[in-house]
Amino acid sequence: MADKNPAKNTAEKEQNVLMEKIVALCKRRGFIFQSSEIYGGLNGFWDYGPLGAELKRNVKNAWWRDVVMMRDDVVGLDSSIIMHPKVWEASGHVGGFKDPMCSCKFCKKLYRADTIWELLTASEWAADLLKLYAPPGGGPATGADLKKWALARGKRLAPNLALVRNPDVTLSWMAEAAQAGGGQIRFTDAKEWISYLSTEQRAAGPLVTPCPACGGDLTEPRPFNLMFKTHYGALEDEASLTYLRPETAQGIFVQFLNVLNTTRVKVPFGIAQIGKAFRNEINPRNFTFRSREFEQMELEFFIKPGTDAQWHEYWVKERMKWYESIGLPASKLKPYIYKKEELAHYASACVDVYFDFPFGSQELEGIAARGNFDLSQHQKFSGKSMEYFDDETKERYIPHVVEPSAGVDRIALALLCNAYYEEWAPTSESAGAAPIPAEHGKQPPQGFESRVVMRFAPRIAPVKVAVFPLLKNKPPLVEKAKEVFNLLRGQFVSFYDEAGAIGRRYRRQDEAGTPFCVTIDFDTIGEKGPELKDTVTLRDRDTLKQERVAIKELPQRIAEAVR
RNA sequence: GCGGGUGUAGCUCAAUGGUAGAGCGGUAGCCUUCCAAGCUACUUACGAGGGUUCGAUUCCCUUCACCCGCUCCA
C-alpha cells in the first residue's frame, strides 16, 4: 500500500488533537467522566457530571417538547427496561442479534461470518482461482493446474492459502479423499471446492473457510451476543433468563394495544419514548459515541398501509429541521439514504442523519419505514390481534410504522464537538475589542489571549446565566448579587460565583458555555446616582459585549434568548 | 477481537533502583479589580495486582483503562 497522503495525515492528526481537547474539557469542567473511574474505569460506560447532566436533559426536553408536547398526534410512554424474554424472540433480537464472527489466524482480520462468501467472490485471489473451477474444458481443474496456479499467481495473491503454503500436502490429501470416494470428489459447489483448497490437513478438523484478504485459515464462527443477559427473580436458572433491552422501541410495540385503548388516538399517530438501552458493542470507541449503555429517543409513528413513503419523507424533513433547532449547523448534517440492498427485508426505506464529528461523519439518528413487521411479529408470538379498525374507511389492518430513532448521547457529543471553539479574546489592555478567530499554531497578538468557549445554542446550554458581584469583600455587592441570583434561579439554571477576579469568572463560564453573565457593580447599588441604580451589566458569551440592563428586565431578556 | 502506543497532582510536563518537583488550576486571605491581574498561604499524584530486590514510581510479568490502526456497528 502506498503512503497515505501526508496532507490528509496532518488533517487527521489535527482532528485527533481537537477530539482530545474536547475530552479533556469534558472532564475538567464536569460534562463527562469515565464510569467507575476510581476503580480503573469500565470500557464502554460513561457518567455525566453536573454540566453534562444539564446538557443531556436539555436535549431530551427539547425532543419531548417538539415531538410530544407540541403535537396533537403523539403520546408518550415509559416502558420497563427488562421485559418478557419472548419480546426479544419476537423482535428477532435473540436469533439475529448475535453476529457470529470469524478472524484470520494469519492476518488477524475480523469478519462477520455471513458476509465472508460475498467478500470472497469479490476478492482478487478467489475470483482468479474460481476461473479454474469451471475452465473452458469444463469441470474443476486438475491437480497439476492447481499447483501451477499456486506457485505463480497464488503466491502473489493469496500467500496464506493452504494450496499456496503447501500445495503438495493439500493436493495429496485431496487425491486420497478422491480415491477413497471412488476416483473423483463431487463438489456440491464452488464454495466447497474453495474450502477444500483452503484446508491443509483434513485430519486436523473440518474444512477451512479462507480469509478473503490473504487466503489464511479463519477461525470457526464465534457467536457475539450483543444483548446483556440478566435474570429476573432470585433464582438464576434458565427459566428466569432475560435481557436488558437493546432498544426502547419494543416497549412501544408491546404496549401498542394498551395505548390505543386508553388514549382514543387514531391512525396516524405516534408513541414516543426516551430511555436507556444496552448493547454489548464489540469495540467501544470514540469517547461516548459507541457506548454499551446509552439513551435513546424513539418515536413509533403508526400509519395506514400504503402511506409509508410520504410519512417517511415527512419525518426525515422534520428531524433534519430539529437538529438545526438545537444548534447543529446544516453544513455538518448529512442524510444518508439506504440503498435497496442495504435495507432489512421488511423495510421500505431508511435514512440516517449523519453529523461531522472530528473523528468522521457518524450517525445520530435513523429514520426507518419498517412496514408492519414489528406488530405482526408480536401478533404472531403473543397470539393477540394487533389489528386496528379504521372508523372512517371501515377497514381493518395492522398499521405500518415509521421509526425515527435517535441517540441522546450521540447528540450530546455532537453538541459538545460543535460548540468547542478556540479564539483570541482581548485582555484588559485592549478591552472592548472583538474576539478574533485563533490561527492554528500561532500566538495571539499583543493585547489578546486565547480562550476556549463552548458556543452552545442558548436553548441547550447547561447553565443559562451566571451572577457575579464585582467584588466579594463588599457586602452590599454580595447581598445584591444574591438577590438577583434568587430572582433568576427559579426560572433558569443559574450559577452564582464570587471567587477570584471577574475576568477569571467570565472565562470559567465560557468553558461551561453559559450564554449570559450578570455582574453587580457599584453603579447597581446607586453609587453613581439614581439612574443607574438597580441596573447590571449583561455580558454576552460570544461577542463579549456588555450592556446595562435593569434588574427587573433580566428575566424577560434571558427568557427570549433561551427559548 | 488483533496489532502499536500511553498511564506521575484537576490539567501540562519533570526527575529518580533509596518512596517525587515545577507551571497552570483549585481553595482561603488582602485589594473600589469588568475579561484567566497582583501578593500571601494552603491543597493534591507514581492506574491496579503480582514478581525480582535489603529496598521498585523506575526492571520483569499480568491486568485494567485510554489513544491510534485494522475490524465491526443488527
Image (cartoon, coloured by chain):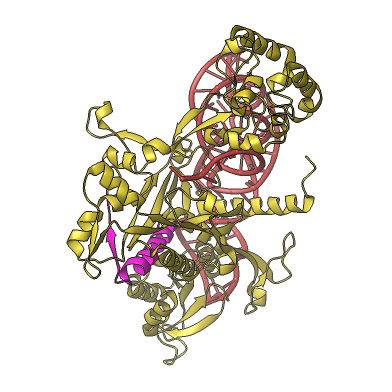
Chain colours: A yellow, B red
In the image, residue A371 lies in the stretch drawn in magenta: no
- Per the picture, the main secondary structure of the magenta-coloured stretch is helix
In the image, residue A68 lies in the stretch drawn in magenta: yes
> Where does the image place residue A355, in percent across and percent down from the top left?
55, 59
Quadrant of res B53? top right
Q: Quarter holding the C terminus of chain A? A: bottom left
User: Which one is nearer the viewer's eye here, A515 or A418?
Assistant: A418
User: Which one is nearer the viewer's eye here, A243 or A426?
Assistant: A243
Toward the right, the furthest residue is A152
Q: Residue at x 52, y 32 (%)?
A: A101
Quadrant of res A242? top left
Along the horizontal axis of the image, is A486 left or right of A406?
left
Residue A105, visible in the rendered structure: no
> Where does the image place residue A159, in percent across and percent down from the top left?
74, 25
Toward the left, the furthest residue is A262
Q: Quick check: A409 above or below A553?
A: above
Q: Quick check: B22 above or below A99?
A: below
Q: Quick check: A94 above or below A428?
A: above
> Where does the image place residue A245, in percent across and percent down from the top left?
34, 43
Q: Residue at x 60, y 67 (%)?
A: A331
Quadrant of res A119? top right
Along the horizontal axis of the image, is A533 left or right of A14?
left
Q: Quarter holding the N terminus of chain A? A: top right
> Where does the image place residue A252, in percent across and percent down from the top left?
30, 53
Residue A102, visible in the rendered structure: yes
Residue interval drawn in magenta = A51-79
